[in-house]
Amino acid sequence: MTMSSAIKILEQKVPLLKNMCQAIGHSILNVVQALGGITLFALDTIRHCLTPPIFLRHILRQFIDIGYYSLPVVGMTALFTGMVLALQSYTGFSRFNAESAIASVVVLSITRELSPVLAGLMVAGRVGASIAAEIGTMRVTEQIDALKTLSVNPMKYLVVPRVVAGAIMLPILVLIGDIIGVYGGYIVSTHVLGFSSGSYLYQTWQVIEEMDVVSGLVKAGVFGFLVTLMGCYHGYNSGRGAQGVGTATTNAVVTASILILIFNYLLTQVFFS
Amino acid sequence: MTMRPKIEMRGVTKSFGTKHVLQGVDLDIPVGSSMVIIGGSGTGKSVTLKCVLGLLQADSGSIKVDGVEVVGASTRTREEMMKKFGMLFQGGALFDSLPIWYNVAFGLIHGKDVSKKEARHLAIEKLEQVGMGETIADLYPAELSGGMQKRVSLARAIATNPEIIFFDEPTTGLDPIMADVINDLIVQCVKDLGATALTITHDMASARKIADHVAMIHQGKIIWTGPVADLDQSGSPYVDQFINGRASGPITDPQSELLKSA
């Protein structure tokens, strides 16, 4: 191959290479920009949580919307997770004649991991999506601008109540989920697998420590903050029209779910390493 | 000495990425007068209005309201300034989770610390001023027609007795009769309050009815301004094309104008 033909081929490839680099650079910039935007939004939210005026009635209403109405979905998730855990660990442990470990597996997995993470994910789907859709629609129909012209700060009026309610209500939901989940394992163990109820409960009490429950509740608080923050952030920065609101809703659920999984790992490392 | 204008804009620019929407807007709005900005879609009407309101930050230039600079002002200054403003949004922008009376009373309750009972009373008074009454006070915005929503929105805009009122395309999406009703209400309300008004519209019937002064915006600049009476003798081919609604002319075909002047 001569020198000139090699150069010719290279020249043909250059635009392609340039396009590729451009695309990669563009998406990296987007990610960095989004991370910066979310961080600033979070700091702004925290600042507004600490300064008056506080819309107390709105916070109470969000307690009901975010907390109370999520109870069925979180309860069902916890119940069936507890039940399936008992069933699965029985089939595994019976091979080693270690059936007695079922109670400890159920109670530790539920309180430390499954109840907070699954509750967080369910609430991300239920609450995160609805927050993003509601605030996104308010953005699109200029209701957020209208709030500003009426001298009300939309961060205080819309964002703070939701984030505060999320961070407080999710731990309460998870505590209830803990109880229901352990009860689910108990039902399957005593009614399906034929364990005696006394020894199952005894083992549960033996193995559980304060730290297991507390770590789960701290995780839940963080997840509640993240889910509501993502809903608010994406709704607040929603694009135009129905499509913009749709994208905001999807992004709210996806980023909240991913952040829950990442923070779950980080918090577990902090608590149990 | 002439009176200082209520709103004074000098060389205001605003870009979104590579799109330069405002390219140096100069405009004075005298105290107590009604200024209407006309211009086609996408020429920067809404952006101008939002820059004055402080919903968007201008990139450069100066916007003074009562002699106080808005561009680059602190959040606190802007929040203080917002108390002088009332705004009628294009789509109404009523809060759909709140009943009508609370929508109207919103600025009184949250901005001026009026008690709820008092605010409701004042809200119904304002609703009566725009031709509606207590009967609709407890309904929700979604239960009203477009024209009625506009009226409620107008009542909300004037509820706090603002010194300056902005109207964003007040007649868009209304039938001609309802549009005229809204025009009349705007004229009446502005007169009653003695307020300064800034309206953006492309509805010429509305502009002629509301305006004391008209300004025409084209490609991010004010290209003509004058009293509404001079609108038909503006001497500007751009204004002529716009107010007569012609498909051909310097706005739609810049080349022809260049050739003529060459």
Image (tube, rainbow, N blue to C red):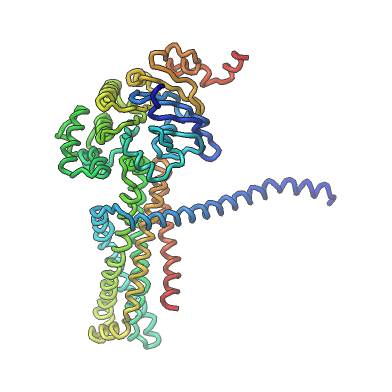
- Tell me the residue at 26%/29% (across/down): B147
Q: Position of residue A155 (x, y in %)?
A: 35, 50
Q: Position of residue B204 (x, y in %)?
A: 38, 19
- Tell me the residue at 39%/36% (across/down): B53
Q: In this rendered view, identify the residue nearer to me: A167 or A74.
A: A167
Q: Can residue A141 be seen from the camera position used here?
A: no
* Quarter where residue A94 is shown: bottom left
* Quarter where residue B133 is shown: top left
* Quarter where residue B257 is shown: top right
Q: Can residue A240 be seen from the camera position used here?
A: yes
The answer to whether residue B253 is above or below residue B118 is above
- Tell me the residue at 38%/24% (across/down): B3
Q: Position of residue A217 (x, y in %)?
A: 33, 70
* Residue lying farthest to the right in this orientation: A2
Q: Position of residue B115 (x, y in %)?
A: 18, 44
- Tell me the residue at 25%/81% (across/down): A190
Relative placement, left or right, of A96 versus B158 is right
The answer to whether residue A245 is above or below residue B171 is below
Q: In this rendered view, identify the residue nearer to me: B24 or A60.
A: B24
Q: In this rendered view, identify the residue nearer to me: B106 or A198.
A: B106
The answer to whether residue B97 is above or below residue B156 is below
The answer to whether residue B50 is above or below residue A19 is above
* Residue lying farthest to the bottom in this orientation: A97
